[in-house]
Amino acid sequence: MDNKTEQKLQQLQMFEQNLQNLIMQRQNFQVQLSEIDSALNELKGVKEAYKMIAGIMVLSKKEDIIKSLKEKKEIFELRIKKLEEQEKLINDKAKKIQSEVLSEVEENKK
């Protein structure tokens, strides 16, 4: 295998690591998004709501908590969307390099 092919293999490994990191981040954000959805659903059936401030539960306006949760939800949805875009971009680059490496390996066999 020539030097150029080895560099492409290293680049491919780097893409795979980056992809794994992005997937972990996205999954983390999806868990947090799920928790926000759960909290919003719980708030539908209550009259009073509390929120945690520095480890202390404080009675708060239900509407303020809902507004804050919806804002956080929007942020997480945007982050997830951006991560998915990055994943696709890296996937596309990795597939291109993978096909180049496979072609080079096939040519070297001849």
Image (tube, rainbow, N blue to C red):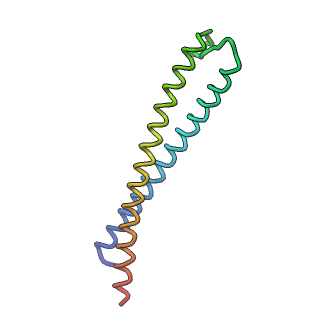
Image quarter for residue 43? top right
Q: Quadrant of the C terminus?
A: bottom left
Residue positioned 54% across, 14% down in the render? 64
Q: Quadrant of the N terminus?
A: bottom left
Residue positioned 44% across, 55% down in the render? 17
Count of numbered labels shown in the rendering: 0
- Residue 34 vs residue 14, the one in the foreground: 34
Would you place residue 104 above or below residue 45 in this image?
Answer: below
Q: Could you say where residue 15 lies in the image, as x and y percent from the top left?
A: 40, 58
- Residue 22 vs residue 48, the one in the foreground: 48
In the displayed orientation, state which residue is furthest to the right. 45
Q: Could you say where residue 34 lies in the image, as x and y percent from the top left?
A: 60, 35
Residue positioned 57% across, 20% down in the render? 66
In the displayed orientation, state which residue is furthest to the left. 4
Residue positioned 32% across, 67% down in the render? 7
Would you place residue 29 above or below residue 99 in this image?
Answer: above
Q: Is 4 left, or right, of 52 in this rendering?
A: left
Q: Could you say where residue 60 lies in the image, as x and y percent from the top left?
A: 59, 10
Q: Is 16 left, or right, of 104 in this rendering?
A: right
Would you place residue 40 above or below residue 89 in this image?
Answer: above
Q: Is 71 left, or right, of 40 in this rendering?
A: left
Q: Could you say where residue 18 lies in the image, as x and y percent from the top left?
A: 42, 52
Image quarter for residue 79? top left
